[in-house]
Amino acid sequence: MRIVALSGGVGGAKLVSGLANVLPPERLTVIANTADDFDHLGLRICPDLDTVIYNLAGCQHPAQGWGHAGESFHALEQIRRLEPADSWFLLGDKDLATHLLRRKWLDAGNSLTDVTAQLARAFDLSVTLLPMCDQYVSTRMILKQPWQGQTTLAFQDYFVRYQCHPEIKDYAFSGIEHSTLSDAVNLALQTMDALVICPSNPFVSIAPILSVTGFKDAVLERQCPCIVVSPIIAGRAVKGPAAKMLHELGLRQSAVAIAEFYRDIASHFVLDSSDEDLALCIA
């Protein structure tokens, strides 16, 4: 079977690593969210793509799940000394090498798909890793109350700079209307035998992927099994702010709300054993 997996960052990358351990590499394609991407210090940062790369390469930080194992932060320490305002995003020295090369290859006219393939080869990945699209898309968090004088925040400001403290009332994907399916993503969707949606945040990790122009239509037309793995276990998120976002969006903090979110696309839904009492609510 040809499996396509949709992934965000840490939670999704863990399942992707498990799939890579049991599937022949030519049978697995991972499509990662890029709506978290942003430019920082002149570099294009792709947090979810990089987290998947590092996990598949086995070099991720074992406790964090993101960033490099054995990382050093000499460059960041110097940035903090010279320009403290630019030191809020944790860039390790090894991680900087990834971003520097990505910037170089993008500036040379390569697409994000091609650049990601170059990085995958450099890290000796055996599975295919694709960005959701080549166009720049940015997740915006729409706030219930102004924060630092702003009514909306870019996702990395919300997630990293302000540690998810602002309350949200909605979210949007700036630039999504200009997105298109790359040839590689389109081929993966047209030839897949099953789609796996990893336990990533449904709102800011998976929804951007499904919102790429033509993506959901291609999935529905394929009519193959779509297996959703719940990112909510016993009311808590596997990783990140998904449970907090459910509450602030007025939704139930449980796997039931996740199942409802994917109802139009999912054929199977995977629950943790601690949520087995919810199975009848989802079926």
Image: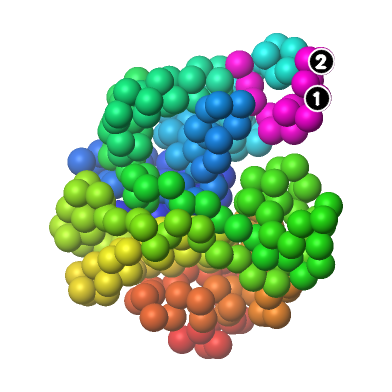
- Asked whether residue 103 appears in the rendered view, the answer is yes
What's under tag 2, amino acid-wise?
Arg
Q: Which picture quadrant has residue 225?
A: bottom left
Residue indicated by mark 1 = 84
Q: Do the residues under discs 2 and 1 have CB atoms within 8 angstroms?
A: yes
Q: Is residue 251 above or below residue 161?
A: below
Indicate whether 187 appears above or below 263: above
* Residue drawn at (30%, 29%) of the image: 109
* Residue 17 figure quarter: top left
Q: Which residue sits at x=55%, y=73%?
A: 258
Front position in the image: 213 or 29: 213
Span highlighted in magenta in the image: 80-93
- Quarter placement of the N terminus: bottom left
Q: Secondary structure at mark 2?
A: helix
Whether residue 89 appears in magenta in the rendering, the answer is yes
The amino acid type, in three-letter code, at marker 1 is Pro
Q: Nearer the viewer, residue 154 or 70?
A: 154
| Residue found at x 39% / y 63% | 177
Determine the CA span between mark 2 and mark 1. 6 Å
The residue under the point 42% across, 60% down is 176
Horizontal side of residue 128 vs 265, given as left or right: left
Res 81 label: 2
Q: Is disc 1 placed on a helix, strand or loop? A: helix
Residue 86 screen position, x and y as percent:
73, 28
Within-10-Å neighbours for mark 1: few <14, some 14–19, many 20+: few
In percent of width and height, residue 129 lies at: 33, 40
Q: Is any part of residue 219 visible from this angle?
A: no
**Magenta span includes 94:** no
CA neighbours of label 2 inside 10 A, class few (<14), some (14 to 19), many (20+): few
Q: Where is residue 49? Give x, y as percent.
A: 45, 39
